[in-house]
Image (cartoon, grey):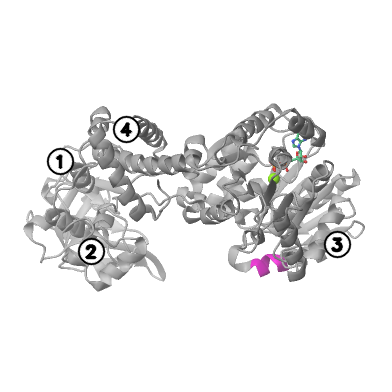
Amino acid sequence: MDLSTPLTYIKGVGPARAAMFEPKGLLTVEDLLSYVPFRYEDRSNMKSIAQLAPGEMATVVAEVRSARVAGFRRRNLGLFEASFSDSSRAILRAKWFHSEYLAKTLEPGRRVALFGKIEFDNYTGELAMLHPEFEILTEDDDAAEAALHVGRVVPIYEAISKVNTRAIRTIVHRALAQIAPLQDYLPESLRTRFKLVDRWTAVRQMHFPTPDSDLRLLNGFRSPAQFRLIFEEFFWLECGLLLRRGKAREQAGIGFELNDQVRERIKTMLPFKPTSAQKRVLGEIARDMAAPCPMHRLLQGDVGSGKTIVAAEAAVIAIENGYQVAMLAPTEILAAQHFSYLKPLLSKLGYVVVLLTGSFSDREKLQLKKLLAEGLVHVAVGTHALLEKNVEFRRLGLAIIDEQHRFGVMQRLGLAHKGAHPDVLVMTATPIPRTLALTVYGDLDVSVIDELPPGRRPIVTKHVTADHVEGVYSFLKKQISLGRQAYVVYPVIEESETQAMKAAEKMYAHLSREVFPDLSVGLLHGRLPIPEKEAAMEDFKLGRIQILVSTTVIEVGVDVPNATVMVIEQAERFGLAQLHQLRGRVGRGAEQSYCILVTERINDAARERIRTMVDTNDGFQIAEMDLKLRGPGEFFGTRQSGLPALRVANILRDQEILAAARNAAAEFLDQRTPAGEFERAMEYVHGHWERRYGLVEVG
Ligand code: ADP
Ligand code: MG
């Protein structure tokens, strides 16, 4: 048996269990050994019932004597009570609330291991356990395997479908017993420097900690074994990312010339003075563009921080050097927004800017494609329609991609291949901490705009419950009488866009007829035909619509400085990032802006999100909270962001180990010593990287 052996070769894993393991990505022994216990219990304090003392944590192996679901007349409390006895003949009671279902499991005669705190029951004068952890001990366990579950520090695994922690523990133990000791591929020098235990020891101790293990370290994922495995996972990941990055930088790219004429043209285009943050990031971009290898840069900046103008400056550099620019947006509305923002700026310099989206007719598309291929267009703004195979640029020099999150990495590459390795600039308004950014967007360099344009006032955010919505309406009236405009937004829940649309339509009817009969109210949602959408946006921009009711189509990109109120209905249904994005649609002018979060049925998680919104306007803080609340997997949308699925490590919990591993990897790749070790490690990274992360791009 080795790491690649299918799990069905382990006794106890038949086709049925294998089928339950598969969706979790557990196919081989290696997968199983990377299935990490999420906590540990110290069950080494084994006592007979007679020995128990109130207040202690103990493990008792005993038999169920009697069991019942307690209730009072018609009220069923779901309280499950059982009494246990062992060879000491003393009795121990245990209670579980809301646990009627236990009646089926804890039947009289069953032998169980109970683990928990011993309490003294004042009423009965007996010892009792409240909600103890327990495991059924089956008779056919051989002695060695029975000893896995009690009398020691025990790993607790998350159940996999119907396979419980106990069964997983047994299977893992069998795998460890049958496999040959694992080799260690981490360079010796690193192991010494970071005092890392060897891999075989680490894997075994992660699953079955030694008796002297520190439980607190274990449950904090910082035991020597866990540390070693986390470090290792990050180290190889970073090696892979750095290699891929290095390779990308060896490719031939375009060395754009940045001379006085280009600078002059940029100055002519700029409608305002850039902030110092904008100047700094343009400097970083310009340096990349001047270098003769392709730029891969991520531009992070909070909503409204002014990323678009920086993108426009980069476009000028490319165009003045005789190249074309593609700008990719995730939605049609956003593409249209970018187009209407960029067109006047760039037309001023005599450049031709076109828009290409999926909703264009075939004839229109054909024409535009011809212009692009002939090089008659300088800037093409578009949606994924720009990525279609038959779209060809004559001389694509710069690709700008807005909102990284919505595009797969492959698509990004697809675009990059359309020219002779054009420069790529990715823009995102979902800021994340720097070390994370460097890993999540592994092959990208990161620039950050950390300053808002001058004169912006922080947006005032308020939370209102739906029964106080009248107050919101009179506030809207007042703002509009002052000449301002407002948005009222409805959440689109993934599976029910129709529902959001209906809610928006209903609210539109209600607001326009009953609440604000004297004002002009407009409606915008995803299902409207494009011309109607554009007309609604245009009317809002020109102030002909005072209140725009919409679904989340305006989530990104709308730029109407006179709009000062953002009302978000059913705000409890939006995620933090989305709320922040929406709020960023106001506060773009000199007037004080407001964001009003209206909630209907709010739970704790939603309350936390709303509180965060009310407390801060800072996108970085919000992103960090979002990351905490949702967890990295969901936050980054692993598949979409190209972030490989980590197994032992947790990118959020283990940030400082990530940073250390990243530095170590960079140093290791840089020094390439000692020679034999380096080659061995490289071989491992290639083989391992491909299988584990499914990436074939590594050097
Ligand atoms: P982002 O895309 O980062 O959310 P935008 O590029 O849409 O932000 O910019 C938001 C608004 O701020 C736009 O109206 C833009 O013209 C304006 N703006 C950007 N930079 C500046 C600046 N340096 N001075 C004044 N206004 C600016
Ligand atoms: Mg933008």
* Foreground disc of the pair 3, 2: 2
Give 298 or 53, whichever is nearer the viewer: 298
Q: Earlier in the sequence, mark 3 or mark 1?
A: 1
Q: Earlier in the sequence, mark 4 or mark 2?
A: 2
Q: CA distance from mark 4 to mark 2?
A: 37 Å
According to the picture, the residue beneath numbered tag 1 turns out to be: 211
Q: Amino acid at mark 1?
A: Pro
Where residue 544 appears, as percent x and y from the top left, is 90, 54
According to the picture, the residue beneath numbered tag 3 turns out to be: 512
Please give left or right for residue 84 compared with residue 245 in the image: left
Q: Earlier in the sequence, mark 4 or mark 3?
A: 3
Q: Amino acid at mark 3?
A: Ser
Report if the beta carbon of the residue with label 2 is closer than 8 angstroms to ligand 2.
no
Within 10 Å of disc 2 (Cα), the crowding (few <14, some 14-19, many 20+) is many
Q: CA distance from mark 3 to mark 1?
A: 71 Å
Please give left or right for residue 284 compared with residue 478 in the image: left
* Observer able to see residue 23: yes
Q: Earlier in the sequence, mark 3 or mark 2?
A: 2
The label on residue 7 is 2
Is label 2 in a helix, a strand or a loop? Answer: helix
Is label 3 in a helix, a strand or a loop? Answer: helix
Using the rendered view, name the quadrant where residue 89 is placed: bottom left
The residues colored magenta run 497-502
The label on residue 672 is 4
